[in-house]
Amino acid sequence: MNRLLSLCALPLLLVGTVAAAQTAPVISFNANWSLTESAPLVAGGSAQVAYDATRLPQCRTWLADGTPTWSITGHYRLNNGTPGSFDVAGLPSTGAAPVIPLPEAGSLEVWFRVSGPDCEHYDSNYGTNFRFTVQPAGTAVPPTIVFQEGWVEYVVGTPKAGQPLVIDYDIDRLPECRLLYNGAPTWDVAVHYRFGSGTVTTTSVTTVSGFSRRGAPVTIQAPTWARSVTMWFENWDRGYCRRWDSQFGANYTFTIQP
């Protein structure tokens, strides 16, 4: 699905060149609007950004000598702190390579801006920004499939057969069925999943604390024979409200490596 405007021909992929970034996890923003995170982000390290400039095709003008008058700039913010920025494509404006320092654990936001003479557009998940989790140093994190608000899905690491896999689902993707009874939630959100052509298993992606229910990552185990996992999500309450997150009935399928 095109999340901004139609793409134009200018496939440009910029990858950081500093030595420290060569071993850093890579967050890729692909031309088809998919995201990938090659490995978990860890506090005390950094994240390398690979951005396909065809996601922001606007504002493309050049001087007579071929110098671009436009710039694509990446922006980031960790734990609602002071924003930082880096150059992505076009005319350099920040002098910074596309590498994000991660001094502490928490929530990382990333967004992009293209600008030129009298022109400005954003790639920011409709203004909510793209969000990633920075783990504390020393934390062992299994491969994770993230379902983010704004209909963004991406895989952290490489799901493998015979190993655990985390499903991190933002229940704000299914916000409608929220009936209460005497102040207590009578609703839930669950994932239905199936490895290969195996049986369907269902488990909740929420947890209850007192009179509130919130989303919670769940860990599932991939069989040794699995080469794919398909999943979809269901939200319901006792008032017969029922909603689905199933990619319009096609469901979400991810590759499992041997």
Image: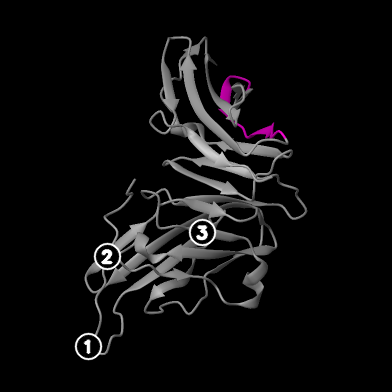
Give the quadrant of the N terminus. top left
Residue 32 percent location from the top left of the image: 40, 53
Q: Secondary structure at mark 1?
A: loop
Residue 253 percent location from the top left of the image: 52, 37
Q: Is residue 102 visible?
A: no
Vertical side of 74 occupied by 110: above or below: above
Q: Residue at x 30, y 64 (%)?
A: 57
Q: Residue furthest bottom?
A: 65
Front-most of residues 143 and 45: 143
Residue 8 percent location from the top left of the image: 28, 63
Front-most of residues 227 and 3: 227
Q: Secondary structure at mark 2?
A: loop
Residue 30 percent location from the top left of the image: 45, 57
What amino acid type should be assigned to the residue bearing mark 2? Gln
User: Do callouts 2 and 1 mark residues in contact (Cβ within 8 Å)?
Assistant: no
Q: CA distance from mark 2 to mark 1?
A: 19 Å
Q: CA distance from mark 3 to mark 2?
A: 20 Å
Residue located beneath label 3 in the image: 28
Give the quadrant of the C terminus. top right
Residue located beneath label 1 in the image: 64
In the visual, does 91 lie left or right of 211?
Answer: left
In the visual, does 38 lie left or right of 234?
Answer: right
Chief secondary structure of the magenta portion: strand
Vertical side of 98 occupied by 189: above or below: above
Magenta residues span 209-223
What amino acid type should be assigned to the residue bearing mark 3? Ser
